[in-house]
């Protein structure tokens, strides 16, 4: 496995980066992975490098699924960069820290692109990690990031629209689902006056694709394309976007085979307009209601 741990508060180890890049096959992608709220690499109990960003996560938590392993970042097939940042504390503290993390991510992505300009460079962010990823883009040269995969993004539509409209060379896949609706509501309550979250869908841009994985029609369309993803098991789950069986085959295709997963194809087959609901006639009441006197 090719995995390079990097923390937002630490300097970039360019020697380690050079060594890992040298072992990659031509055309193999670099994938930068960002965790969300509550993780902190400075706290052993919340260290993402022992959890979802590890090749062998500790088994203390049922949500500890190895992102780099499931993304197929093995040997010469790709480099996984595990980006840790201080997302612990309250939601307001983590939100404030996310902007500094975005600046650090901008520096990292700039260095990676400069060292290997012809190699695909993708970013995956869950929850507040998606917010960090979005805010790293404005200071980058256009086209630095090829694909941005947002999973249950703790970010807002208006800010995403402003950022991505100026980055036509970066394709965005926004994975949503109703099982994250409670967390979207909590984010809006914590940070009011910012408008709808990306859980309600993103901007109408040619380089943006919403993937609503709570809809049976979307899952059926993906199944026809060869991606068999299970429906959500529970009505509320912030981690469904990376815990559901079958989801990783789609993510691997998006990041390793972008030419085989063009956004126009996915948009045409997956995000068809929902049919309007037909109002059914109510059955007759078994009794005549009493009129209040």
Image (cartoon, rainbow, N blue to C red):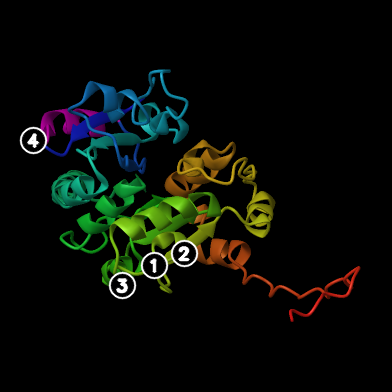
- Mark 2 or mark 3: whose residue is earlier in sequence: 3
Q: Quadrant of the N terminus?
A: top left
Classify 201 as above or below 2.
Answer: below
> What residue appears at the point 27 percent right and 71 percent down from the top-left corner?
162
Q: Position of residue 64 (x, y in %)?
A: 42, 27
Mark 2 burial class by Cα count in 10 Å: few <14, some 14-19, many 20+: some
Circle 2 residue: 200
Q: Secondary structure at mark 3?
A: helix
Instruction: Look at the image and say whether residue 68 sits in the magenta stretch.
Output: no
Q: Are marks 2 and 3 in contact (CB under 8 Å)?
A: no
- Mark 3 or mark 1: whose residue is earlier in sequence: 3
Classify 14 as above or below 260.
Answer: above
Q: Tell me how far mark 1 sits from mark 4, CA to CA.
A: 35 Å
Q: Tell me how far mark 3 sits from mark 4, CA to CA.
A: 31 Å
Q: Are marks 1 and 2 in contact (CB under 8 Å)?
A: yes
Circle 4 residue: 11
Circle 1 residue: 196
Q: Are marks 4 and 2 in contact (CB under 8 Å)?
A: no
Mark 3 burial class by Cα count in 10 Å: few <14, some 14-19, many 20+: some
Q: Position of residue 133 (x, y in %)?
A: 27, 52
Mark 4 burial class by Cα count in 10 Å: few <14, some 14-19, many 20+: few
- Mark 1 or mark 4: whose residue is earlier in sequence: 4
> What residue appears at the point 28 percent right and 67 percent down from the top-left corner?
159
Q: Is residue 102 visible?
A: yes
Q: Secondary structure at mark 2?
A: helix
Report the span colored magenta.
Answer: 11-23
Instruction: Look at the image and say whether residue 16 sits in the magenta stretch.
Output: yes
In the picture provided, is 202 more to the left or to the right than 280? left
Circle 3 residue: 165
């Amino acid at each position: 496995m090719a995995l390079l741990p990097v923390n937002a508060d630490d300097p970039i180890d360019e020697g380690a980066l050079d060594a890992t890049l040298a072992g990659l096959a031509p055309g193999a992608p670099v994938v930068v992975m960002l965790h969300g709220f509550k993780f902190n690499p400075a706290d052993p109990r919340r260290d993402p490098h022992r959890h979802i960003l590890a090749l062998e996560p500790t088994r203390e938590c049922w949500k500890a699924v190895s992102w780099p392993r499931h993304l197929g970042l093995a040997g010469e097939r790709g480099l996984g960069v595990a980006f840790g940042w201080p997302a612990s504390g309250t939601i307001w503290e983590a939100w404030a820290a996310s902007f500094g993390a975005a600046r650090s991510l901008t520096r990292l992505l700039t260095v990676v692109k400069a060292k290997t300009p012809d190699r695909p460079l993708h970013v995956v962010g869950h929850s507040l990690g998606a917010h960090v990823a979005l805010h790293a883009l404005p200071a980058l040269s256009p086209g630095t990031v090829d694909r941005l995969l947002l999973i249950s993004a703790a970010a807002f539509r208006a800010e995403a629209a402003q950022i991505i409209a100026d980055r036509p060379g970066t394709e965005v896949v926004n994975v949503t689902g109703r099982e994250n609706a409670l967390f979207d509501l909590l984010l809006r309550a914590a940070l009011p006056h910012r408008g709808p979250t990306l859980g309600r869908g993103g901007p109408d841009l040619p380089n943006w694709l919403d993937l609503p994985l709570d809809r049976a029609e979307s899952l059926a369309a993906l199944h026809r394309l060869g991606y068999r993803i299970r429906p959500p098991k529970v009505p509320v789950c912030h981690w469904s976007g990376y815990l559901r069986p079958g989801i990783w085959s789609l993510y691997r295709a998006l990041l390793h085979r972008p030419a085989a997963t063009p956004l126009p194809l996915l948009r045409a087959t997956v995000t068809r307009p929902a049919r309007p609901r037909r109002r059914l006639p109510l059955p007759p009441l078994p009794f005549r209601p009493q009129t209040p006197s």
